[in-house]
Image: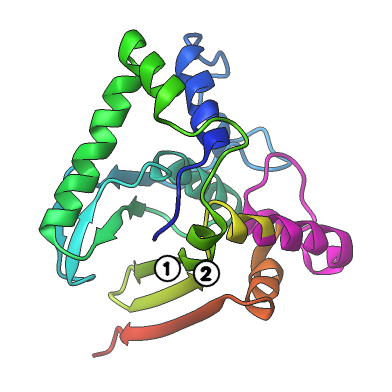
Amino acid sequence: MEGGPSGGTLETIVELTSHPITEKSKLGFNPLLKLVGSKEKSKNVFSSSLHVFLGYSPDHNSWVGFFPMSVGNLEIVRRSNAILNFGENLHYEEGMTYPNFFVGFLATSGLFLLGTCFFNGPIFSFLRSYVLPKPGEGPSIETQENGFLNAVGYGTGSKGTKVKSELYFDADPGYKSTGRMLAEAGLTLALNQDKLENVGGALTPAVGLGETYLQRLIDTGCQFNIELIKNKDN
């Protein structure tokens, strides 16, 4: 991916880190696993891992490191699995690819350094006042136009079948592409109710918007492809 930092997003992170949640849930289980319309929780086993450190990935043929949004995305997939039942023993991991080790090392080190600064009052106060973009500030029009996001997914089934998918956005994912995502999500809810899952509760995009939303993104400029890499019988 390529794009510019968002002042509003950074401000959100500041608020989250400034007011951490210290109370534990009294429900007795993770509410993300609660099934819709049932008092039972999902029995699907879910495991996940973060690419905290930089490493080489043969699947991507490139270096893979930590992706900040993966912390939240893991929980979104967990909730989708509880409702849609992707399968038992689901394992999910997510990271960000880099063109070479040097770029990956600098980017990963920079992320951890910035994260450390968030918890150092004087240093972060200086960065917030004089370096980082403020709420309402963000990348230039040129940066937005030249930005992109290529989300590549690899899936391996319980019997060994492997598939690969690619979803490509041709603009800054944090600004221009986000605006289109929000607009198409709203249109999906307003105009395509008959094609959506008839469930309530806390829903994820996969549940509440589904393939109808994906098709809208494709129709308005995204590129999507999914292919079989290895058949279970091969």
Using the image, tell me which numbered label, if any, was put on residue 169: 2
Quarter of the image holding residue 40?
Answer: top right
- Tell me: 157 left or right of 128: left
Q: Is residue 227 left or right of residue 115?
A: right
Q: Are marks 1 and 2 in contact (CB under 8 Å)?
A: yes
Q: Residue at x 45, y 18 (%)?
A: 17
Badge 2 crowding class, 10 Å Cα cut-off, few under 14, some 14 to 19, many 20 or more, is many
- What amino acid type is highlighted by mark number 1? Asn
User: Amino acid type of disc 2?
Assistant: Phe
Query: From which residue to which does the magenta span run?
Result: 180-208
Q: Position of residue 97 (x, y in %)?
A: 27, 60
Q: Is residue 30 visible?
A: no
Q: How would you rate the neighbour count of disc 1 (Cα within 10 Å): few for under 14, some for 14-19, many for 20 or more? A: some
Q: Nearer the viewer, residue 194 or 104?
A: 104
Q: Mark 1 or mark 2, which has the lower sequence index?
A: 1
Quadrant for residue 85, please give it. bottom right
Answer whether residue 198 is magenta in the image.
yes
